[in-house]
Image: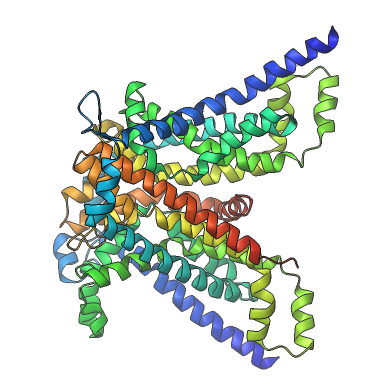
C-alpha cells in the first residue's frame, strides 16, 4: 500500500516540475513548427482567414525561378565562410597575445568585449555613421584613398563592411572562449617542448592548436549558427543594399513575408533554412569532434 | 630575458594602440551626440564647440525614454524569471528521475535549440495573436519563456549531477518535499549556474530585435529600446546628431551594467559557451 502511495506522489511531482517547461516549449516551438510545415504548402497573404492549399508549388518556385533566394543563399554562404574563418583566426591570435603576461591583459580583454553587449541594430547604425560621414573627415585629414571608397555604396565593399562590422561586434566573445581554452592547456607540455628545441610556430601547430580543438569546436559552432542567421546587423547597416546585393536568407524571408505579404511562400523558405542549418551544423559537429584530441 | 621583456613591452604598446582603434566607433558616436547638426556635417572628428545637452533632452522626450526603459525592464525581468523558475525545476526533476520518459522529455525540451527563430516566426506571430500575447509588453515577456527554456534546461541539467543526491534524501527525512524542498534547498546551491543563465538571457532579451519587431511594433507605448532606436533612425536619417544621441541612450544602460559587473559577465558568457 505504502509503496503505491509513494509512486503516485513521485509521478505527481514529476508532472508538476516538468509540465510548465514542456508547455512553454510546446507553444514556443513545436506548435509553431508544425503550423509552419502546413503553411509552407499554402498560398496565404496573412490577412485571409484560411490559407489555400497549393501543394509543392512554393518549393518548386523557390528552386526554379527565384533568383533573389538563390542570390541571398549564396551571399549568406560567402558571408558565413569568411566570417567563421576570420573571426576564429583573429580571436586565436588575440587570445594568445592576451594570454601572455601583459600588464593590461584584463583591461584589453574587457575593451574587446564591449561591442558584444551592444545590440546589433545599434552597432549597425554606429558603423553606418562612421563609414558614411566619419570617413569623409578621415580622408580630409589623412589624405588616404581607403577613406574615399564607398564602403556602403558598392556591392563588393558593402559585403566586406558587413563582415568587418560583424567581427568587430563579436570578437570579444570568441577571445574569451579561446583564453579559457588556452588556460586549460598544461604548461608542462609547452615547457617540455621548449626543452626539446621546438620553435614558437612548431609549438603552436603541434601542441597549442590540437589541444585547443574543443574551444575551436565551440567557437566554430557558435560562429556558424550565428552567421547562417545573420539579420539585424545587415538591416541597420545596409538594409540589403546597394541594389539588393547584401540580402541574407533571413532578410529575404523577412522581405517576402512581412513586406510582400507572401506568408506561405516565406514559410516555405524558412523551412528550407531550417533544414540547411540542421544539416550544416550536424556535419560541422561530427567533423570537429573527430579532430579533437585528449591532453 | 632582457630581450623577452622588451618584446613584451613592444607587444603591449601595439595592443593598446589596437584597442584604442577598436573603440574608435564608440568614441565617434559619443562625440557626435554632443554636437550641432552643422558641426557634424563640417567635421565628424572635431570636438564640439559647446556640449549640446539639448540633443539629449530632445531625444529623451521624443522617444519617451522612461517608458522604453520601463518596457525593457518589464520584458527582461518577466522573461528571465520565468526561464529560471521553470527551467531549473524541470532540469532538476529530469536529472533525478531515471526513466524512459525523463529521457524523452529532456530531449523534447532541448531539441528546439536547433530551430532558428526565423524559421517559425510567422507561425509564432499567428499563435501569439490567438492568445492575445502580441502588442503587449507582458505578453512579449511571457513569450521569452519558451524561447529561453531549452538552453536553461540544458545548462542546469549538466550541472545537476554535481549536487549529491544525499542532500535531497536528508531533506526528505526532515520532512521537506516537492517544490518546497527544491526551492529551499536545491535552488540556492545552483547559484553559479543561475548567474550564468541570467547573464546570457538578460543580454539576449534586453537587446533582442526581431521578436519585438514583429510583436510590439504597432504602438509607441509598447516598444523596446532597440526597436525604438531603429524606428527613430528611420525617421531621422540625416539628423546624425540626434541619431547618435539615440544610440548613446540605447547602449548606455548596457554599458553601465557591464562596467559594474564585467568580471561576472565575461566569466558567465565563457561558462555558458563551454557548457552549451
Residue at 63% in and 19% down? A16
The colour scheme is rainbow
Report if residue B106 is visible in the image. yes
Residue at 19% in and 49% down? B234
Q: x, y (%) of residue B111?
A: 55, 40
In this rendering, the answer to whether B210 lies above or below B248 is: above
Residue at 81% in and 24% down? B171
Q: Specify the farthest residue to the top.
A: A1
Q: Specify the farthest residue to the bottom.
A: B3
- The answer to which of A238 and B110 lies nearer the viewer is B110
In this rendering, the answer to whether A71 lies above or below A137 is: above
In this rendering, the answer to whether A125 lies above or below B173 is: below
In this rendering, the answer to whether A168 lies above or below A282 is: below
- The answer to which of B197 and A10 lies nearer the viewer is A10
On the rendered structure, is B13 left or right of B233?
right
Report if residue A180 is visible in the image. no
Residue at 77% in and 42% down? B162
Give the image quarter of residue B213.
top left
- The answer to which of A83 and B252 lies nearer the viewer is A83
Q: x, y (%) of residue B267?
A: 61, 54
Count of residue discs: 0
Q: Quadrant of the C terminus of chain A?
A: bottom right
Q: Quadrant of the N terminus of chain A?
A: top right
On the rendered structure, is A166 left or right of A155?
right
Q: x, y (%) of residue A235?
A: 28, 54
Q: x, y (%) of residue B125?
A: 33, 32
Amino acid at each position: 500500500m505504502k509503496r503505491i502511495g509513494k509512486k503516485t506522489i513521485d509521478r505527481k511531482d514529476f508532472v508538476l516540475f516538468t509540465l510548465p517547461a514542456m508547455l512553454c516549449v510546446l507553444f514556443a516551438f513545436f506548435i509553431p513548427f508544425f503550423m509552419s510545415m502546413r503553411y509552407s504548402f499554402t498560398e496565404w497573404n496573412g490577412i485571409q482567414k484560411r490559407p489555400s492549399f497549393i501543394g509543392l508549388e512554393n518549393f518548386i518556385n523557390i528552386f526554379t525561378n527565384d533568383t533573389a533566394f538563390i542570390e541571398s543563399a549564396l551571399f549568406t554562404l560567402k558571408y558565413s565562410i569568411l566570417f567563421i574563418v576570420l573571426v576564429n583566426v583573429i580571436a586565436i591570435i588575440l587570445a594568445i597575445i592576451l594570454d601572455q603576461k601583459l600588464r593590461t591583459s584584463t583591461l584589453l580583454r574587457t575593451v574587446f568585449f564591449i561591442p558584444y553587449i551592444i545590440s546589433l541594430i545599434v552597432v549597425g547604425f554606429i558603423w553606418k555613421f562612421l563609414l558614411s560621414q566619419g570617413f569623409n573627415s578621415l580622408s580630409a585629414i589623412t589624405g588616404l584613398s581607403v577613406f574615399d571608397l564607398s564602403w556602403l555604396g558598392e556591392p563588393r565593399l558593402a559585403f566586406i563592411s558587413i563582415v568587418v562590422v560583424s567581427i568587430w561586434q563579436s570578437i570579444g566573445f570568441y577571445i574569451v572562449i579561446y583564453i579559457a581554452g588556452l588556460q586549460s592547456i598544461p604548461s608542462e607540455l609547452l615547457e617540455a617542448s621548449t626543452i626539446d628545441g621546438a620553435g614558437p610556430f612548431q609549438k603552436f601547430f603541434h601542441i597549442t592548436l590540437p589541444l585547443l580543438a574543443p574551444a575551436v569546436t565551440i567557437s566554430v559552432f557558435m560562429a556558424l549558427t550565428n552567421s547562417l542567421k545573420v539579420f539585424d546587423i545587415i538591416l541597420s547597416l545596409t538594409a540589403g543594399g546597394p541594389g539588393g546585393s547584401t540580402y541574407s536568407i533571413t532578410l529575404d524571408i523577412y522581405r517576402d513575408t512581412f513586406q510582400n505579404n507572401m506568408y506561405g511562400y516565406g514559410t516555405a523558405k524558412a523551412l528550407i533554412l531550417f533544414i540547411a542549418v540542421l544539416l550544416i551544423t550536424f556535419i560541422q559537429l561530427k567533423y570537429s569532434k573527430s579532430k579533437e584530441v585528449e591532453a | 630575458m632582457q630581450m623577452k621583456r622588451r618584446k613584451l613591452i613592444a607587444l603591449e604598446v601595439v595592443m593598446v594602440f589596437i584597442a584604442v582603434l577598436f573603440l574608435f566607433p564608440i568614441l565617434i558616436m559619443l562625440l557626435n551626440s554632443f554636437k550641432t547638426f552643422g558641426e557634424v556635417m563640417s567635421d565628424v572628428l572635431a570636438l564640439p564647440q559647446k556640449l549640446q545637452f539639448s540633443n539629449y533632452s530632445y531625444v529623451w522626450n521624443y522617444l519617451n525614454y522612461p517608458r522604453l526603459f520601463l518596457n525593457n525592464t518589464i520584458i527582461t525581468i518577466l522573461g528571465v524569471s520565468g526561464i529560471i523558475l521553470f527551467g531549473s525545476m524541470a532540469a532538476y526533476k529530469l536529472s533525478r528521475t531515471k526513466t524512459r520518459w525523463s529521457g524523452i522529455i529532456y530531449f523534447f525540451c532541448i531539441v528546439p535549440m536547433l530551430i532558428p527563430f526565423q524559421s517559425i516566426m510567422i507561425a509564432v506571430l499567428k499563435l501569439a495573436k490567438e492568445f492575445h500575447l502580441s502588442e503587449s509588453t507582458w505578453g512579449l515577456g511571457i513569450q521569452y519563456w519558451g524561447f529561453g527554456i531549452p538552453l536553461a534546461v540544458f545548462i542546469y541539467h549538466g550541472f545537476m549531477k554535481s549536487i549529491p543526491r544525499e542532500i535531497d534524501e536528508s531533506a526528505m527525512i526532515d520532512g521537506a518535499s516537492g517544490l518546497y524542498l527544491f526551492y529551499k534547498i536545491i535552488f540556492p546551491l545552483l547559484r553559479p549556474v543561475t548567474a550564468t543563465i541570467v547573464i546570457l538571457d538578460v543580454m539576449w532579451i534586453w537587446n533582442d530585435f526581431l521578436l519585438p519587431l514583429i510583436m510590439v511594433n504597432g504602438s509607441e507605448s509598447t516598444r523596446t529600446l532597440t526597436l525604438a532606436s531603429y524606428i527613430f533612425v528611420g525617421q531621422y536619417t540625416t539628423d546624425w546628431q540626434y541619431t547618435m544621441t539615440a544610440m548613446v541612450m540605447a547602449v548606455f544602460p548596457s554599458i553601465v551594467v557591464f562596467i559594474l559587473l564585467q568580471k561576472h559577465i565575461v566569466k558567465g558568457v565563457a561558462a555558458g559557451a563551454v557548457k552549451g
